[in-house]
Amino acid sequence: MKKHVCDVLVIGSGAGGLASAVSAAHRNLDVLVVEKEAVFGGTTARSGGWMWVPCNGPAKRAGVEDSPENARRYLQHEAGDHFDAARVDAFLEAGPKAVSFFEENTALQFDLGPTFADYHPDAPGGVDGGRSIVARPFDGRELKGEIRRLRPPLSEITFLGMMIGSGKELLHFFNVTRSPVSAFYVAKLFLKFLRDMAFHGRPMRLMNGNALVARLAKSCFDRNVPIWTGAPVRELLRDEKGAVTGAIVDTKEGAVEVTARKGVVLAAGGFPQDPLRRKALFPHAPAGHEHVSPAPPGNTGDGLRLGEAVGARVDDTLPNSAAWVPVSRPPRGDGTLGVFPHFVDRSKPGVIAVTRSGRRFVNEANSYHDFCQAMVKACRQDDDGDICAFFIADHRVLRKYGLGYVKPAPVPFRQHIRSGYLTEGATLAELATQIGVDPRQLETTVARFNEHARKGEDPEFHKGSTSYNRSLGDPEHKPNPCVAPIEQGPFYAVKLVIGDLGTFAGLKCDENARVLDEAGKPIGGLYAAGNDAASIMGGNYPGGGITLGPAITFGYIAARHMSGANS
């Protein structure tokens, strides 16, 4: 068997793994990254790429007022009985340092989301913006030939393959037919996209999670850190004292025994594609197959199984084992179904969600995690074995904002009706009959909603009542950017089911990112970052980027600890 010796072995190439690798390499450690799939980037490369890090440098430079004490109060409120004080304090201490480290020493640069509010901004310690940052757009040509190994973005959240940024850029796309400035902005981006496709066969203006991975990977390559793709880990190796000393890695050239002198980092992306663990931990998926995930197919819980095989334990006590998001299933050209996560349309004026009962069940503009919890509860109360819901909108809203995978005007939409993704009805009763919703109750629900919506009000669920709600609404729509009546037929519906943005249930770890055994003691030489580590959010979803913020922070912490440094 071939042998390879390094200081640090990182298993997985998402944000947590690459952050660990870059941080360790900066401390003059010899690092190897191994990735099971043929491309690197993991779920991060498909994600929105936001990172939740209180008191970060970009926010401070923008004059945002915050404090670790305030953030700690918020996390304590959010996590409740599952608040892990030691790990939360470590995150709040190291998070701003990690951001500064990456800004000063790597290709990773950040942009601030100044109006990107916490998801519960009115809770103790919550804020209206400043804790979420995103990787700055990146020119993929800087990766040179390695761009071919970068996982592409999730196709369903691109426009013809072009990546679109959040915030102001997204508003330009919504306003393309109503603003000459927006039309010029979008046209310029589209021409660059066409140029890249002609010369490179893929977009080179990388955004969101794709930019985050590309910047971290560029930093790895700049420090001569190899990333082996198509290299799954078969097993971890231990010494006579039980400490982890390396792993057996399967490669195209055969198995390689990798010795890691300082440590092994598990960062394989959690278990969103593992039906057996989903069956055990996802209440809405009793067979394990009812759940739909936009995560890559390789995220099957390898890191968790590797950890358990050497005595680690998965924390399965959290009230939510994953970060939930409503998804819909647009048909693809090859006959398979895609996965579209609904981030933005929930907040738009003139969009409501109902179950098969025909009743609303939630403030649609609340966080996707909260939306899904309410959806499961409502379906169970209705005694509906099919846990699903439907977005309802009228023709004006469909053409102005789009709905799910359906894009706004001037993009055609009839093909989505033909495919079955979008359902159309001349009346609400006709629409309800087609989608299996109680017609009379849907008419009653919409009539009651419209009565108040004409005044911009929603006394039943208070849509538009928080800064987070309003941040994703239509700022041009008054008086409430999230509320408008549904009255101009024909009417449309899109079916929603439960998906995820990553798993929360992971290996128990300490404040230094060390994996713990059954007795709560660190397993020598074994660390975890990203979704392989149990979430510090206590099974809740406090704000945009609460998976990737801790991922890069605990990757930084793991490298710091392996190098013997204190800062």
Image: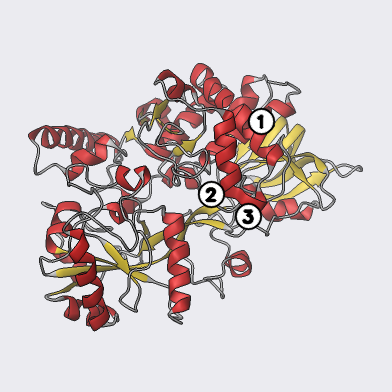
Query: Which-is-in-front pick, marks 2 and 1?
Result: 1
Residue 422 in view, yes or no: no
Badges 1 and 3: C-beta atoms under 8 Å apart? no
Q: Is mark 3 on a helix, strand or loop?
A: loop
Q: What element carries label 1?
A: helix
Where's residue 338, x and y in %? 36, 61
> How many C-alpha atoms fall within 10 Å of the one at disc 3: few (<14), some, or many (≥20)?
many
Q: Residue at x 14, y 65 (%)?
A: 414
In the image, 403: left or right of 98?
left
> How many C-alpha atoms fall within 10 Å of the one at disc 1: few (<14), some, or many (≥20)?
many
In the image, 376: left or right of 90?
left
**Nearer-N-terminus badge (1/3):** 3
Query: In the image, which disc is placed on residue 505?
Result: 3
Q: Which residue is drawn at 23% across and 70% down?
A: 448
Where's residue 173, x and y in %? 19, 42
Q: Residue at x 54, y 58 (%)?
A: 272
Query: In the image, which disc is placed on residue 557?
Result: 1
* Viewer-proximal residue among 267 and 327: 327
Cα–Cα gap, marks 2 and 1: 26 Å
* Viewer-proximal residue among 544 and 23: 544
